[in-house]
Image (cartoon, helix red, strand yellow):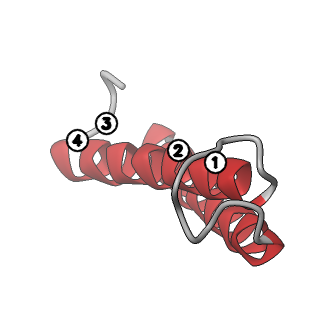
Amino acid sequence: MQGLDRSARVVLIVAILAGLAGAVFIGQGLGIITGRSFMVGDRTWAVIGTVIVVAAASVARRTWVRRQD
């Protein structure tokens, strides 16, 4: 991340955090992560989590490629 300016770093960090949150949504939706949440076992959250992960990966990749030019 040395070649990235401050705003690009912030975007990448937010994208990474969003991707991790999406992964938690997937885990809870599929029942892999258990607990006392309304999300556990509801596959809707797995789908939402997948969309979040894909969007976060897309933003991170676009930011990384654009800033490396």
Query: Can you tell which mark lies on residue 5?
Result: 4
Residue at the spot x=67%, y=54% of the render?
Answer: 28
Query: Can you tell which mark lies on residue 4?
Result: 3
Check disc 1 and report the residue beneath it: 23
Residue at the spot x=66%, y=42% of the render?
Answer: 33
Check disc 2 and report the residue beneath it: 20
Q: Are marks 3 and 4 in contact (CB under 8 Å)?
A: yes
Instruction: Indicate which disc, 3 or 2, sits on the residue closer to the N terminus.
Output: 3
Query: Can you tell which mark lies on residue 69?
Result: none
Q: Which numbered mark, 1 or 3, is in the foreground of this view? A: 1
Q: Is residue 34 above or below residue 56?
A: above
**Local secondary structure at mark 4:** loop
Cα distance in 3D space between marks 1 and 4: 27 Å
Instruction: Indicate which disc, 4 or 2, sits on the residue closer to the N terminus.
Output: 4
* Image position of 48 (left or right of 17): right
Amino acid type, label 1: Ala
